[in-house]
Image: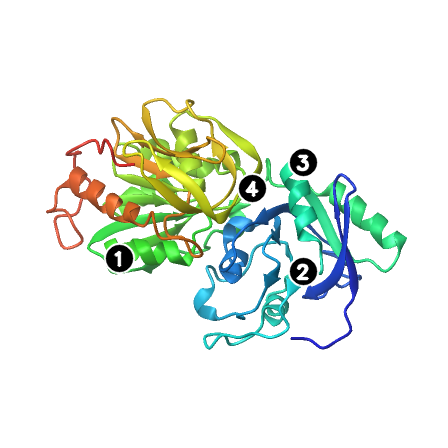
Amino acid sequence: MSTARPVAGALVLADGTTFEGEMIGAPLASDSPDTGGIASGEVVFNTVMTGYQEVITDPSYAGQIIAFTYPHIGNYGTTPTDAESRRPFCRGVVIRDLARRRSNWRSDGDLDAYLRGHGIAGIAGVDTRRLTRHVRDCGAMPGAFGPAPDEDSLSRLSVAAQAEPGTAGVDLVSEVTTPESYTAGDGPWRVVAYDLGIKRAIAVNLGRIATVEVVPAHTTAADVLAREPDGVFLSNGPGDPQMAGSVTAALGDLLGKVPIFGICLGQQVLGLALGGRSYKLPFGHHGGNVPVRDEATGRIEITSQNHNFAIESGSVPGVDETHVCLNDGSLEGFACRDLPAFAVQYHPEASPGPHDSRYLFDRFAELMASFWGDARRRNGTGGNGASAGCGRGAG
């Protein structure tokens, strides 16, 4: 960890609320034409107690500044094994207390060095308890942080916060999606996964049941069907589902022709493709301990979640609503009645978080088996034949 003298900084929200701290991570050069010494984005809080590296490297945080509610961050360092993407896409991090010493045999570096290595700035020493209460009460909002040695600096931060557009109406998927297709896993089914901001842990879990070809978000339905998949997966990702129009349009040509499973943003774009409506939550769901009820069994799952938008309950025609969030009653899962498609709003792969919901990947395999029959696997007949079932109850 750097031993340089701390640089005074501040985080200013769009409503003018100010939080003092010390700059950490990558320096924000005042002469940079891109930042001008300021990092800005939509400020959200995450309630995980561990897994800070997985959170920071989750592409779903593109366009956002992550505030950690747990006060002590960085104590076990970082390791390439825990990275969920090729690099962090968040705009910055806010921490109460940055650990000065890492204590874990797996780590190969400290968090401060990791942030600097990836060009991510942060601010520590912030009263994150006060910040969390403010965002909870007033909603997620744009903010800006940077060095703040004087009133003029605070004024510039305030202007930057008010100018930050946030995530509504912004295309963030194009920022995080893979530029080229690649393959993961060696399971018996063949799955094409739309990369809307896919996490490594999702690809690993899909790889247990399928050989997965991860494709860019702009891939057409014709291109997907030409790959003769047994199933199509819609990944997590950042921002407003209304801005993922190319994927929503492709789904119109995929529904009914191949089984589909969506997670997080994947649920949202599937819901829109089916005729549903999306909306923005007040401060989103970001954490590893969100209770969700399976409406068919009454079973409660503790889930990992990271999303600011959701699909409006009751707005999607032709589905059974399968899961509900017990914190606010929002829709957490649905299954089509007459099409082989289902989705959940939460993260069954966790990373970080509990593993209560990992059975959903096996349920996707069961849906593919029901639709095609066991004969159609990677070593089977291939082709895009007529459906053998509707997959009802798959969610």
Residue 274, x across and y down, in percent: 38, 27
Q: Earlier in the sequence, mark 4 or mark 2?
A: 2
Q: Quadrant of the N terminus?
A: bottom right
Q: Which residue is under mark 2?
A: 122
From mark 1 to mark 3, how far is it between C-alphas?
Answer: 42 Å
Q: Which residue is under mark 1?
A: 208
Can residue 265 be seen here? The reply is yes
Callout 1 secondary element: helix
Q: Earlier in the sequence, mark 2 or mark 3?
A: 2
Q: Residues within 10 Å of mark 4 (few under 14, many from 20)?
A: some
Callout 2 secondary element: strand
Q: Earlier in the sequence, mark 4 or mark 1?
A: 4
Q: Is residue 109 left or right of residue 212?
A: right
Can residue 345 be seen here? The reply is no
- Write the residue at 55% across / 33% down: 280
Badges 1 and 3: C-beta atoms under 8 Å apart?
A: no
From mark 4 to mark 1, how far is it between C-alphas?
Answer: 31 Å
